[in-house]
Image (cartoon, rainbow, N blue to C red):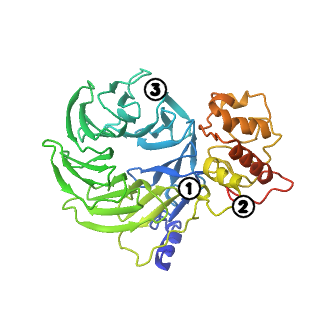
Amino acid sequence: MRSRAKLLACALGALTLAHGVSLARAEWPEALVGHGGPVKSVDLDASGERLLSTSFDYTALLWREPGAHGAPGAPLRLTGHNAAVNDVRFLPGGRAATVSDDSDLIIWDLETGKELRRYRGRGEKVLSLDVSPDGRFVAVASWENEARIYDLESDAHGAHAVLSTHRGNVNSVAFSVDGTDLFTASYDGGVRQFDVLTGTLKREIINFGWGVNVLKVLPDGGSLFFGVTDGKVGVLDVETGTEVKILPPHTRPILSLALSPDGKRAASGGGDGVIRVYDAKDWELLEEFQNPYGPVWGLAFTTNANELFYVGLDDEIHLWQVAPRKPFETVDVEFPRRFQVANTDDPGELQFARKCSVCHTLSPDGGNRAGPTLYGVFGRKAGTLPGYPYSKALLEADFVWDEKTISDLFDYGPDVVTPGSKMPIQRLKSVEDRDALVAFLKRATDPDGGPATNGGTAQ
């Protein structure tokens, strides 16, 4: 917990003195709770007063710093993707851009939460995006073995340029400081440089031999901060292709990188749960944090670079105080997560935890995640639970959920049973596994006798 002095500062931040002079505004809390699934990315705007986050729950959320815009209230929910939302960026003019496993790029109005424009992808997931310094172009990293550049000032429905010379998935994209070039990181090990206006490949700067997961352009314009699947993290000279700085490696793939707004600090986050913060001038290691509960998928510095938002398997966004470093740090999260259940003798409960619990709850008060609560699902017509934004396919479905239809769903897959729906493909080939799952669901979702559950395991 924060010190009493810091808590007092938070409380005073919301007050106004009698003569009209405002005290310092309240700080961001240590955790932001609102998503219904693991959080994939975070982005803080230049003012430091608004934060965007994306999640496996198919949504992005816009958060406002307490005291910055009055009462914090509930976050603004951006709903429109049909799969996990992987990355987000603020755009000029009160807008934002998101990308998803559904392959699409969506531009949002952050005042209304409405979709302004959707650029359709080509079917494969889009893992990350970047915005040019002038806000005109958005580039996306696609698992179609390509990157795409979109011109937001154009009326064209398609991409301005398709960069298709990669030999593997494209995992990350980053615009140069002047916006004329785009750098791409690919699973084929290559870091490439393209001309933004023409889409022409200038060169492959380096090939690491291992997939490159993340890239950031450093403020000097001539260097790239990179992270690789083998845990390597370092600095690359763009002109020479030389690794000018190799930093302490992570034991698992690098999944996230961040630069402070002033460019003076840099951070890396890995699949090992380790976050490291560096002085971005001499690359001295300043602080290290160990999140014991899973990978670090997203990072974002606060405006003063003294705190760092980080996200991963947890449904919450956490804030780590980098400086001054706290002597003791505990991460107050539920562990193991609902989908990490192992201590059960019920094979059906185990299958639910593994296959269903990220997207669905079992209790009436558990809320909706990527999918609706399954409470009372047996005997319910598909697509009829009030308050859940069903896909057109399920709204138009003409069947009732029962033992057979639920078993068929995991036998043939949602692409056959509910074609066109948002449901990810989850199949169980074994008849015994399907029967066990159906039996567990029938007990756990029964309003007249099911266990009080909230997310996957009986509690």
Vertical side of 91 occupied by 200: above or below: above
Residue 44 in the figure: left or right of residue 214: right
User: Which dot, 2 or 1, sits closer to the camera?
Assistant: 2
Mark 1 Cα within 10 Å, few/some/many (few <14, many 20+)?
A: many
Mark 3 Cα within 10 Å, few/some/many (few <14, many 20+)?
A: few
Which residue is located at x 53 percent, y 65 percent? 14
Q: Amino acid at mark 1?
A: Asp
Q: Which residue is mark 3?
A: 122
Q: Amino acid at mark 2?
A: Ala
Return the disc, 2 or 1, that comes first in the chain's sequence.
Answer: 1
Of residue 315 and residue 401, the one placed in the foreground of this image is 401
Q: Which mark is residue 458?
A: 2
Vertical side of 51 occupied by 190: above or below: above
Q: Which residue is mark 1?
A: 315
Total of numbered circles in the picture? 3
Return the disc, 2 or 3, that comes first in the chain's sequence.
Answer: 3
